[in-house]
Image: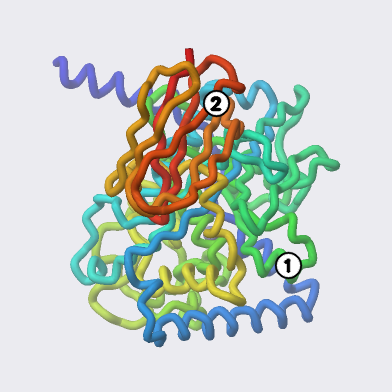
Amino acid sequence: MRKLFTGAALCSMVFAAAVSVAQEVKKCATDELVSQLANNNPSLKNAIDEYEQDIQYRTSLMVNSNTTVYKTTSTYPVALVFHVVLSQAQIDQIGGVAGIYDRVVSQIEVLNIDFNAQNTETIPAPFAALKGNPSMNFGLAHTKPDGTGTIGIEILTKPAGFTGFDVTDGSVKKTANGGLNPWDNSRYLNVWITNITNGGGGGEILGYAYNPKLAALIGDASLMGVVVDYLAFGKRKSLSQSFISNADKGRTMVHEFGHFFTLNHIWGNTAVGSGNCGDDDGVDDTPKQSDANQSVCPSYPKLPNCNGTPEGQMFMNYMDYVMDVCMSMFTKGQVTRMQSEFTAGGGSPNLHKNIHLFSWPAGVNEASMQHNIDIVPNPSNGVFTITHSDGLKQITVHNMLGQIVKQIPVSSQQSGTISVDITDAGKGMYTIQCMYNEGMVSKKVIVQ
Ligand SMILES: [Zn+2]
């Protein structure tokens, strides 16, 4: 009796939490946007085709390269900024400013798990061996392009009556049009969170992305980045939170980041429902499939694939359209294609070279696993010494607003002791960040 009662209560809570979505839920609108633009502009279509050839060329260089730098555990740290554009009612719907912050943090946790192949879902044996590790780490920017401090999240509260931005409307990315401008696209990966509306019909849109080269080809670099619906970002922590059904594990953004790093949908780029085996995603180790697995969770094996092989469709790939809970892998081929974006000629050749702009994400490849710093005394009157291990490159002191209070030059990378004086900054709590090649080690100090 108790079990039955509990079950019923849980069910009603799930229904209460789920957002009513009468229309079909589309995972993302990236293809529709591109094909719409390309159909109206033959020379753009030509340029996109040429860019695809260029991606294939750079990917093949990496595969054939004698150097294994991109195949090792080397990581690509990428600074993120979240531009949130919502009405107060919409902000309240996701728990207010604190709720936004929680969802951003949970989203980054999901990104860092999935983009380091640390997710624990069981993958069927024929596909498990193909699982790749993108080796990308994402962290919130603590420094704006102008050098001032930030928490890496901007929130623009729209007037009551604001509904959202249409999927075809780039205004969410333009301050002058009621949105928020991107930060320097070469150094930050820009993410916008808003209510994505779809005036053209055809379903609820969860997200869309413009990769860097595509935005450049269109002639509007400010479009570059990822947009995710405010009810499809972050990871659900409680049943009372509002999310679009089956989009509550943070995988919409994983999928859109895949697009940002030039991945195509696993069935190719033809419209969902066209059932076309002639189209491919440009990646060799993903089995060809004719169509999307949309908002479902198939059981393995899902037959047939276009190759006629017994493992069937790789529906658990992040670039299919299955429910969040059913996604679990990029392939090695997809990883190489994504990482080729960081090479010369790629869309993001400098995006991973800005670790000084953000805090090393917690839990992933932390330098503190390998390096140690001691700060004595702590608390102090503002004068203290830092004892550090080999390889130290830079020390920065931040206040609790994330602003840089002091940068301390490091004369020798050899282990040793450095004396620091931040009495000018006043009493309070500060974060000491010691940058190593492997990442950042942070410690809090108190000045009293
Ligand atoms: Zn997509």
| Horizontal relation, residue 263 to residue 205: left or right | left
The residue to which callout 1 is attached is 216
Amino acid type, callout 2: Ile
Q: Position of residue 172 (x, y in %)?
A: 73, 44
Q: Residues within 10 Å of mark 1 (few under 14, many from 20)?
A: some
> Which residue occupies 69% across, 26% down?
87
| Horizontal relation, residue 447 to residue 221: left or right | left
State the residue in front, 6 or 192. 192
Is label 2 or label 1 in front? 2
Q: Which quarter of the figure is the N terminus placed in?
A: top left
Location of residue 446 with respect to 137 vertically, above or below: above
Residue 394 in view: yes
Location of residue 418 with respect to 120 vertically, above or below: above
State the residue in front, 151 or 43. 151
Location of residue 265 with respect to 60 vertically, above or below: above
Q: Are marks 2 and 1 in contact (CB under 8 Å)?
A: no
**Alpha carbon distance from label 2 to label 1:** 44 Å
Q: Which mark is residue 422?
A: 2
SS at badge 2: loop
What colouring method underlies this structural image?
A: rainbow
> Which residue occupies 69% across, 52% down?
184
Residue 365 in view: no
Location of residue 315 with respect to 158 vertically, above or below: below
Question: Which residue in the rendered view is the most extreme toward the left?
Answer: 1
| Horizontal relation, residue 298 to residue 411: left or right | left
- Mark 1 CB near ligand 1 (8 Å cut): no
